Amino acid sequence: MKLQFIIIILTLVATLSSCKKDDESAIFYWDETGCADPWKQNSDDTEEERKAEIKRYLENQNVSVNKIEFEFDQAKQQVCYACHCTTGRVIMVKVAWSDAQIMKRLNFYQ
């Protein structure tokens, strides 16, 4: 009986500690535009250069960036050449949960 109780307690502790790690971060999205994004853009930039520019911009806004990734969503691609037209690239940014309000103020969405 004691062994079962100890196993249950250890399982609960392990579960709660792993959930806490997930709760400490949040994922936000940005629909990339042709040239109206707030960070420096160059159509010749590599993916790593884009990530560096986005990270630099967010860190200058006091956001702690954990990870940046890109996805392509054809439904969000606009076939036009105006700066505000979306390219279809969706930028996913994982940040500290404490920075969620800043991200929303910067017009990122969840």
Image (spheres, rainbow, N blue to C red):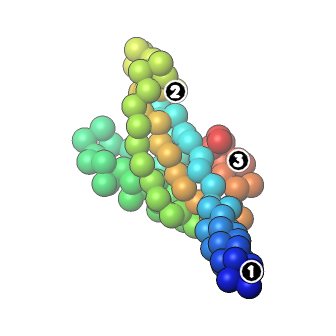
Three-letter amino acid code at the position of disc 1: Met
Helix, strand or loop at mark 1: loop
Q: 103 above or below 85?
A: below
User: Marks 1 and 2: which is nearer the front?
Assistant: 1
Q: Looking at this view, is 89 or 62 the one in front?
A: 89
Write down the quadrant of residue 34 in the picture: top left
Q: Where is residue 53 in the image (x, y as percent from the top left)?
A: 41, 55
Three-letter amino acid code at the position of disc 2: His
Query: Local crowd at mark 3 within 10 Å, few (<14), some, or many (≥20)?
Result: few
Q: 20 above or below 4?
A: above
Query: Local crowd at mark 2 within 10 Å, few (<14), some, or many (≥20)?
Result: some
Kindly identify which numbered label has been placed on residue 104.
3
Residue drawn 66% across and 52% down? Answer: 103
Q: Is residue 7 visible?
A: yes
Write down the quadrant of residue 9 in the picture: bottom right
Q: Looking at this view, is 22 or 77 the one in front?
A: 22
Helix, strand or loop at mark 3: helix
**Residue that badge 1 annotates:** 1
Q: Looking at this view, is 16 or 38 the one in front?
A: 16
Residue drawn 70% across and 77% down? Answer: 4
**Residue that badge 2 annotates:** 84
Residue drawn 33% across and 43% down? Answer: 42
> Could you tell which of marks 1 and 2 lies nearer the N-terminus?
1
Three-letter amino acid code at the position of disc 3: Lys
> Could you tell which of marks 2 and 3 lies nearer the N-terminus?
2
Q: Where is residue 6 in the image (x, y as percent from the top left)?
A: 70, 82
Q: Do the residues labelled 2 and 3 touch (CB within 8 Å)?
A: no
Residue drawn 52% across and 34% down? Answer: 31
User: Relative to 27, is 73 on the left or the right?
Assistant: left
Outermost residue to the front: 1
From mark 1 to mark 2, how far is it between C-alphas?
65 Å
Q: Position of residue 110 (x, y in %)?
A: 65, 42
